[in-house]
Each structure stands twice: as C-alpha cells, then as structure tokens.
Image (cartoon, rainbow, N blue to C red):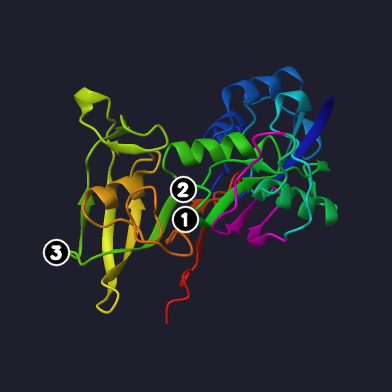
Amino acid sequence: MNQIYKKTIKISEKEAGRTVKDFLTRCLLPKHLRGQLRQERGIRVNNQLVSTAYQLVAGDLLELTLTIDDCDLQGPYPANDDCLPDILFENEDMLVVNKTAGMKMHPHSPTETDTILNYVQAYLDKNESQSLGQPARAYMTHRLDRATSGLVIIGKNPLAVPILNRKIKDKMVKKVYLARVEGDFVKQFGQFNQPIGRSKEDERKRAVRSLDDGGQNALTGYQVLSKDCKSHTSLVRLELETGRMHQLRVHLAANGHPIVGDDLYGGRPANRLYLNSSELRFYLPWTGEEKRLLIENPFNDK
C-alpha cells in the first residue's frame, strides 16, 4: 500500500547558500530517493515547487514529499505492550532505547512478539505517534546481541532509516561499551587487533582467525576504568573501530579477559552478560545536531 510521507526542514544559517541537491546529498539521503523526489515533483520551498538547483536561504522551509510502498519496508512488527521501553531520546525521526539484557532486538517469526521492536511499536501506537504525516513505525537500524544491554537507535520513518543506516555504516555513530571482565590488565589502555572469523568448532561462535584463514580485520580500543581485587575482575571501556559479530566478546576472551557471564566464550557464570552499550555519539538526521547519550553505571556497581 502506497503511503505519502512529508518532511519539513527549516534551513539554518549553516546550510544557507547550498543548493537543494547539495543539502540532500550532505544529509545522506540515498540517490534513489533524491531521484524519486525529482520525478514526483516532491520538492517545495516556502510552499513553492523548486528544482534541486534552488539555492537555499536561511529560514527557508524545505518540504519533501515522497510516495513509498509499505510492502518494501521492514515489518510491520506486531505491537506488544507487556513491557514499556526505556526511551532516553525521541524526535520525529528516531528514538534511542535502553535495551535490557536478555531481550531480543526483533522477531524471527510472526509468533515472536517479545522483542524490543514489538515493545517500541506498542509505545508508538499507544501515544498515537506520527512521523512525516503517517503513523510512526519501529525500524531497526543497528542491533545488539540478545545478552547485551544498552543503547540502540530505532528509526520511525522510511526517510530517516537509510540516513541512520549510512551514518552507522560510515562510523559516524560512535559506540562505547562497558564490560566487567576477568582478571587484571598489564596495560591500562590499548588496542586488540586480531582478525576475527567464523569458528571452525562451533557455528554459533566467532574466533580469532588469520586473514589467510577467513578472518576479517577487527580493531577494538580499550581502557581500564577500575579493578576489583576481591573478585579479580576489571571494568573496561571499549570502543569499536570495526563491527564484526561478537567482536568485543572474542577479543576480550582471546586476550585472557572473557566477559563475566559470557558462557559462550569462557566467562565465569553470572546472572547476565556484563556487557553494556553505554554511550552513543551521533548527529541527528537533517539538522546535523550533535547528540551524546550516556548510561553511567549500567551494572549498578557501588
């Protein structure tokens, strides 16, 4: 079913002087959507039709109108109001949710409804949330392992989603993790750079593998924040420079510091995996405004 989406942007002093084409390109709107806007004559400024060559002026109201077939989109995910999501930020285009450990990101079958996207969809429906003139929908842009807790970005409309996807792919979204891990570190900060590939012994796992043996480059920065002599564990800050599956878990385990609660990679038993996506730094779609969200004490350490 075709739906009409309308986005209105007030042009700032910073963007004044750019053409509409330059502005949309800088906003990372995909080429096929820019072409569709031209074909559908869906670009207006101050309620007047313009071409992509129009030069924007501070204070202009740029309105983009697109017809999109809902069949080409994610979901829709069935709403489930059994759990109220912990929302730390929300605007017309996106929201950031604090996911609990043990919660899946999205359903793998129609019968699954106990995922973060089901709960967010229920929240949007309950609040009759609108996004670009249509009922808001929950769209996944990046994911966390089921066992990992913390901050995730969820899109609300099909224009914002490809922009967010591009920002994440191009490392314009900075993700920082906290982990409680085994043992003491010789160096208080550094990097792990072993390549990572599929495990030959267990299809569920990843492992350190040479590039010649199917591994891919992987880089993790770490900083030791504190250590607990009684439990012989350390709290570390981790920054992903690449995004391999299970990268943090593999790198830490391979260097003698498995995450507490990580039974897949040799961590000691615990009530959860002690890994949390604790900080996101990103720029909002369209406006470029910088945002930083932080969970300071995700494990309730005293």
Image quadrant occupied by the N terminus: top right
- Do callouts 3 and 2 mark residues in contact (Cβ within 8 Å)? no
Residue drawn at 51 percent across, 35 percent down: 166
Residue 69: name its quadrant: top right
Gap between marks 3 and 1 measured at Cα? 29 Å
Image quadrant occupied by the C terminus: bottom left
Residue drawn at 30 percent across, 56 percent down: 258
Numbered circle sitting on residue 281: 1
Residue type of the residue flagged with mark 2: Val
Label 2: how many Cα within 10 Å (few below 14, some 14–19, many 20+): some
In the rendered view, does 179 fall on the left or right side of 47? left
In the rendered view, does 196 fall on the left or right side of 10? left
- Do callouts 2 and 1 mark residues in contact (Cβ within 8 Å)? yes
- Which numbered disc, 3 or 1, marks the residue closer to the eye? 3
Asked if residue 27 shows in the view, the reply is no
The residue where tag 2 is placed is 173
Q: Is residue 219 above or below residue 233?
A: above
Residue type of the residue flagged with mark 1: Arg
Label 3: how many Cα within 10 Å (few below 14, some 14–19, many 20+): few
Q: Which residues are magenta?
A: 84-109
Numbered circle sitting on residue 186: 3
Please tell me which residue lies in front, 249 or 36.
249
Where does the image place residue 11, in percent across and percent down from the top left?
64, 46
Q: Sequence-wise, which precedes: disc 2 or disc 1? A: 2
Please tell me which residue lies in front, 264 or 149.
264
